[in-house]
């Protein structure tokens, strides 16, 4: 009789441990959901692809772990994290690809600041042959407006980091821009990346604020 009671007590304790085993929320699932929401940033930059990639991996790991272990919660978070990561990753990549393919106005060629830099083997050759070859061409380029109070002319820089706006930009990182009517530069100036198209020229000149400039753009398209 005593043995039977002891066995019953053991079975009861085991049953209670099984029934009242604490359940916890999967941190992987929550992290996947958060990263899935942040993946909307893929519509602004391809560098943000790391967010949906991480969200997708964490979501799949959490999904498998929750189905394997009975004490984990958060399956809806994991599922949503996976879905959001995939949707924003594919959607953002598709949108940015479409923008890249359609942003250059007809009749212009896309150029980059790398074409304006001297050959590493000939660092003193400024302007380089790659820039001279663009003289008189109708080009499209992106850059950041160096702070100014002017509305019709300004310096376009390669970036708006410390290398430019924290001091004097490199000579080959500056383009002196003149806007054709009716284009105007808004005040205050937006810090965002700008898109310009116009006729490119290579000639030495002096700018009142930034000193010598060698690259010029007569812009008839400005965003």
Image (cartoon, grey):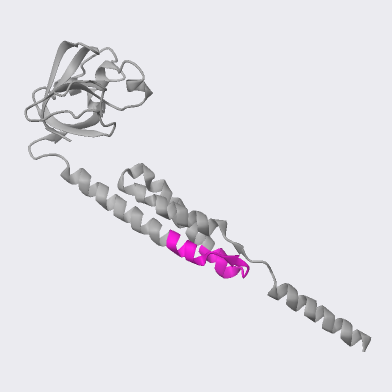
Front residue of 144/61: it is 144
Coordinates of residue 16 in the picture (x, y in percent): 74, 76
Q: With 129 as the anchor, is 59 left or right in this view?
A: right
Q: Position of residue 91 (x, y in %)?
A: 30, 55
How many marks do you count on the picture? 0
Is the N terminus in the top left, top right, bottom left or bottom right quadrant?
A: bottom right
The part of the chain drawn in magenta is: 63-81
Of residue 189 and residue 104, the one placed in the foreground of this image is 189
> Considering only vertical position in the picture, is 117 above or below 23?
above
* Residue sitting at the far bottom: 1
Majority secondary structure of the magenta segment? helix
Residue 79 occupies which quadrant of the picture? bottom left
Q: Is residue 64 magenta?
A: yes
Q: Residue at the far right: name it.
A: 2
Let me know if residue 177 appears in the view. no
Q: Is residue 43 located in the magenta-colored stretch of the structure?
A: no
Provide residue 102's location: percent of width, then percent of height.
16, 45
Left or right, 41 with reference to 132? right
Q: Is residue 148 left or right of residue 9?
A: left
Which residue is at 17% across, 42% downward? 103
Q: Is residue 210 above or below residue 198?
A: above
> Does residue 107 appear in this view?
yes
Q: Residue at x 37, y 23 (%)?
A: 162
- For the C terminus, the quadrant is top left
Q: x and y percent of residue 181 in the render?
A: 6, 28
């Amino acid at each position: 009789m005593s043995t039977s009671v002891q066995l019953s007590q053991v079975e009861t304790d085991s049953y209670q441990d099984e029934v009242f085993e604490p359940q916890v929320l999967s941190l992987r699932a929550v992290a996947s959901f958060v990263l899935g929401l942040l993946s909307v940033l893929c519509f602004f930059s391809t560098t943000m692809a790391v967010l949906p990639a991480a969200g997708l991996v964490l979501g799949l790991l959490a999904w498998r772990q929750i189905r394997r272990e009975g004490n984990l919660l958060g399956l809806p978070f994991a599922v949503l994290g996976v879905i959001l990561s995939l949707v924003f990753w594919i959607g953002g990549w598709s949108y940015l690809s479409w923008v890249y393919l359609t942003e250059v106005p007809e009749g212009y060629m896309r150029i980059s600041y790398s074409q304006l830099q001297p050959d590493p083997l000939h660092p003193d050759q400024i302007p380089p042959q790659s820039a001279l070859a663009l003289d008189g061409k109708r080009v499209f380029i992106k850059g950041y407006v160096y702070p100014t109070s002017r509305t019709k002319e300004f310096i376009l820089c390669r970036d708006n980091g410390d290398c430019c706006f924290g001091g004097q930009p490199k000579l080959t990182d500056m383009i002196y821009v003149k806007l054709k009517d009716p284009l105007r530069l808004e005040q205050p100036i937006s810090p965002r990346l700008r898109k310009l198209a116009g006729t490119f020229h290579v000639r030495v000149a002096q700018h009142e604020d930034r000193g010598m400039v060698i690259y010029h753009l007569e812009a008839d398209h400005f965003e």
